Amino acid sequence: MQDTMRTEIKKRIAPERIPGVYRDTGAGIYLRLMTREDTDRIVAWRNSDAVRKNFIYQALFTRESHENWIRTHVETGDVVQMIICDLANDKPLGSVYIRDIDRHHNKAEYGIFIGEADARGRGVGTAAAKLMLRYCFEEEQLHRVYLRALSENGQAVRSYEKAGFRREGLLRDDVCIEGDYRDIVWMAAVNSGNDQENEE
């Protein structure tokens, strides 16, 4: 189903071990690989107002567009997408991913959304970001992971900073959403071999 992605990841870590390795018992979450069975859930999450308002691209998401995303990005190795799950009951809470994986420069863009309302505001996003950064540096051997956030989404920016991302700049009027130009905060985490660098 996701043979290309799974084969690529198997070179570094068996997929069935991901929930065991990439977990945070304090936050009560773990990461697992996304599957096609998650499609309806992801479409519903992405179309919810709480999630959609924080995306740069806010067009309605469809099952077809998600299946195309899997076919043209996930299965080609351009994207690794995981589901954030509750350790207590395996309930899916949201999704975290890296996209535009650049194997020459060893970098990728980071993204996340918390789909379940009861999972917001309790540190799930920060914990998931830390786990995904660890995955990126340990398994994908990336040197740099960057992200873009709407400047008005201060809660997300603070969460990213807690996870180890640093602000690198502000792009003024960088995107146009529903006729309004918005500023973008550009952030990144660099794998320097010294964890303190990203945490300062």
Image (cartoon, helix red, strand yellow):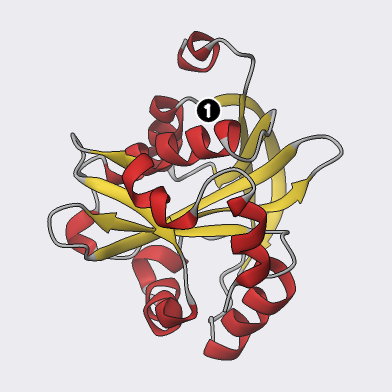
Looking at the rendered structure, the number of numbered marks drawn on it comes to 1
Residue 179: quarter of image:
bottom right
For the N terminus, the quadrant is bottom right
* Picture residue at 81% right of the left edge, 43% below the top: 103
The residue singled out by tag 1 in the image is: 165
Q: Residue at x 25, y 40 (%)?
A: 123
Residue 61 in view here: yes
| Residue 74 in picture, x, y percent from top left | 65, 67
Residue 195 percent across, percent down from the top left: 50, 14
Mark 1 residue crowding within 10 angstroms, few (<14) / some (14–19) / many (20+): many
Residue 179 visible, this angle: no
Seen as rendered, the residue at the extreme left is 88
Q: Amino acid at mark 1?
A: Phe
Q: Is residue 155 left or right of residue 90?
A: right
Lateral position of residue 146 relative to residue 162, left or right: right
Residue 136, x across and y down, in percent: 58, 38
The image shows residue 81 at horizontal and vertical percentages of 53, 59
Q: Residue at x 61, y 41 (%)?
A: 147
Q: What residue appears at the point 31 percent right and 42 percent down from the top-left corner?
A: 23
Q: Secondary structure at mark 1?
A: loop
